[in-house]
Amino acid sequence: MKKTVLITGATSGIGKATAQLLAQNNFNIVLCGRREERLYLLQKELSTHTNVHTLQFDVRDKKAVFDAIESLPAAFSTIEILINNAGNAHGLDPIQNGDLDDWDAMIDINVKGLLYVSKAIIPKMIAQKAGHIINIGSTAAKEVYLNGNVYCGTKHAVDAITKGMQIDLNAHGIRVGAIHPGMVATEFSEVRFKGDTEKAANVYKGFDPLVAQDIADVIHFVITRPYHVNIADLVITPTAQASPTIVHKTL
């Protein structure tokens, strides 16, 4: 029987690559995202492989999150795997120059959004006495770097929340883990630098960064382990990256 996977932030980057890979590997997919046109196109693409349902909402909107998940049709209402992928970084400023709107966006999406979606789905998993939650963190969850302040704080929160989930849900037989990518060449830097594509491209010059498919491969590996195996905490970096700020570049 196919398992059903719900993926937030599914219309780009790691979320999209994961949806594509899992659709090809016998999973039903619930695609969640803000951008209706992207959801439609991805659903059309993946429907040639598997059953796909879309939910359009912003994880920052508490009511929209709960309404969307409650609206799932019977064929998709049993969520075996939740991938909390939606997240962002806004700005790269020292704390004294930080933009309050940027702070709100990162806290609301990276932390509160993850919590809202989890809260909507965890009771269903408890009732099933089974489930698997994967939270996408960052190497910024493990080490703070210059001008990373609030973004690093939100990813440290994801790390701590994941560990709290592991403890609280242990008695219910639910697997919980976090995957912490290093530098991945996606739209991440374009968002961080507010659409400055040249500055974003420079981040990944001079070395081979990870790509979204690399993380998708790891997610697929993690969720297909025998149920008695839980990969609780995993850090993935490009070979060239030794820490969030130490990267061997040839330029």
Image (cartoon, rainbow, N blue to C red):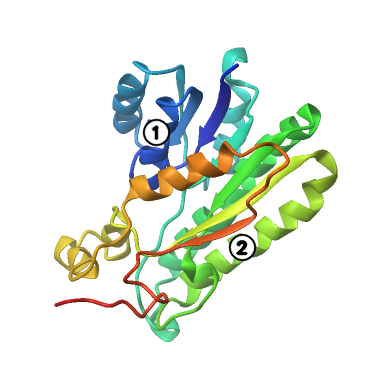
Residue 242, percent across and down?
Answer: 40, 76
Q: Earlier in the sequence, mark 2 or mark 1?
A: 1
Q: Which sits in the foreground, 36 or 61?
A: 36
In the rendered structure, which amino acid carries the disc numbered 2? Asp
Query: In the rendered view of the protein, which quadrant contains the C terminus?
Result: bottom left
Q: Residue at x 40, y 80 (%)?
A: 147
Residue 194: image tag: none
Marks 2, 1: nearer the viewer? 1
Q: Quadrant of residue 122?
A: top right
Residue 168, percent across and down?
Answer: 80, 51
Q: Residue at x 46, y 16 (%)?
A: 51
Residues tagged 2 and 1 counted as in contact (Cβ below 8 A): no
The secondary structure type at the circle numbered 2 is helix
Residue 236, percent across and down?
Answer: 45, 61
Q: Residue at x 35, y 64 (%)?
A: 238
Residue 201, percent across and down?
Answer: 18, 63
Q: Quadrant of residue 161?
A: bottom right
Query: In the rendered view of the protein, which quadrant contains the N terminus?
Result: top right
Residue 159: image tag: 2
Q: Disc 1 designates what residue?
A: 21
